[in-house]
Image (cartoon, rainbow, N blue to C red):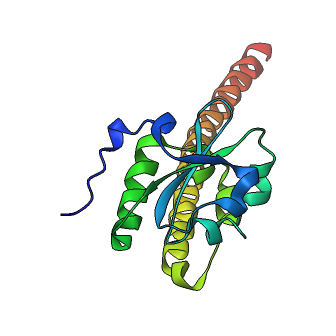
């Protein structure tokens, strides 16, 4: 029977966890893991087939260790083929800030770790981030272009009005 995880019922306090400082003692298990702040907030969610080796050289370790009293909690996942799906569902539910949804576009792109087994996912994410940024810039450009066109039209009207008033004043002064 497949493992069933009800995301809405995840209680971080009920999960096995250890302080980040003890990462060398993490179990060698496949899991979805949570980086939990001192305030018990989910800061990051990831997946791995081996929690212990993942944290030996985690791409976000230097950034995360700056957070005080951080711990890592985990849910062991027996079917490693389901790790990506479970991870994504948990990310969507918790919306952790370090998973890129709340960081600047530049930080999102630079934070992507491109390991050989994740190249496609990384490029898809870069394409999505850059695409969203391009769409936003394009939308702002179009709005400014339309605003500029309206201002130019208004400017032409004002120039015409000034010419008409100048002509009237000249006629009155003759």
Seen in the picture, residue 73 relative to 79 is either above or below; the reply is: above
Closer to the camera in the image, 28 or 134 = 28
Q: Position of residue 45 (x, y in %)?
A: 54, 53
In the image, is residue 26 above or below residue 94?
Answer: below
Question: Is residue 15 left or right of 133 when viewed as pictured?
Answer: left
* Observer-nearest of 120 and 128: 120
- Relative vertical location of residue 139 with respect to residue 166 in this rendering, above or below: below
In this orientation, does residue 60 appear? Answer: no
Q: Position of residue 67 (x, y in %)?
A: 77, 42
* Residue furthest top in the image: 172
Q: Quadrant of residue 81?
A: bottom left
Q: Residue 21 or 135: which is nearer the viewer?
A: 21
At a point 48% along the width and 43% down the height, the residue shown is: 15
The percent position of residue 97, horizontal first and vertical second, equals 60, 44
How many numbered discs, if any?
Answer: 0
Residue 7 shows in this picture:
yes
Residue at the location (39% across, 39% down)? 10
Q: Quadrant of residue 130?
A: bottom right
């Amino acid at each position: 029977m497949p493992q069933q995880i009800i995301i809405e019922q995840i209680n971080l306090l009920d999960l096995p966890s250890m302080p980040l400082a003890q990462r060398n003692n993490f179990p060698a298990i496949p899991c979805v893991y949570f980086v939990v702040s001192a305030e018990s907030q989910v800061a990051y969610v990831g997946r791995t087939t081996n929690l212990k080796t993942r944290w030996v050289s985690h791409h976000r370790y230097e950034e995360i260790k700056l957070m005080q009293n951080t711990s890592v909690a985990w849910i062991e996942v027996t079917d490693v083929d389901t790790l990506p799906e479970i991870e994504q569902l948990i990310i969507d539910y918790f919306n952790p800030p370090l998973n890129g949804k709340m960081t600047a576009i530049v930080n999102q792109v630079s934070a992507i770790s491109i390991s050989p087994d994740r190249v496609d996912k990384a490029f898809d994410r870069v394409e999505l981030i850059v695409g969203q940024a391009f769409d936003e810039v394009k939308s702002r450009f179009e709005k400014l272009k339309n605003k500029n066109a309206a201002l130019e039209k208004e400017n032409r009207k004002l120039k015409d009005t000034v010419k008409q008033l100048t002509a009237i004043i000249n006629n009155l002064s003759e």
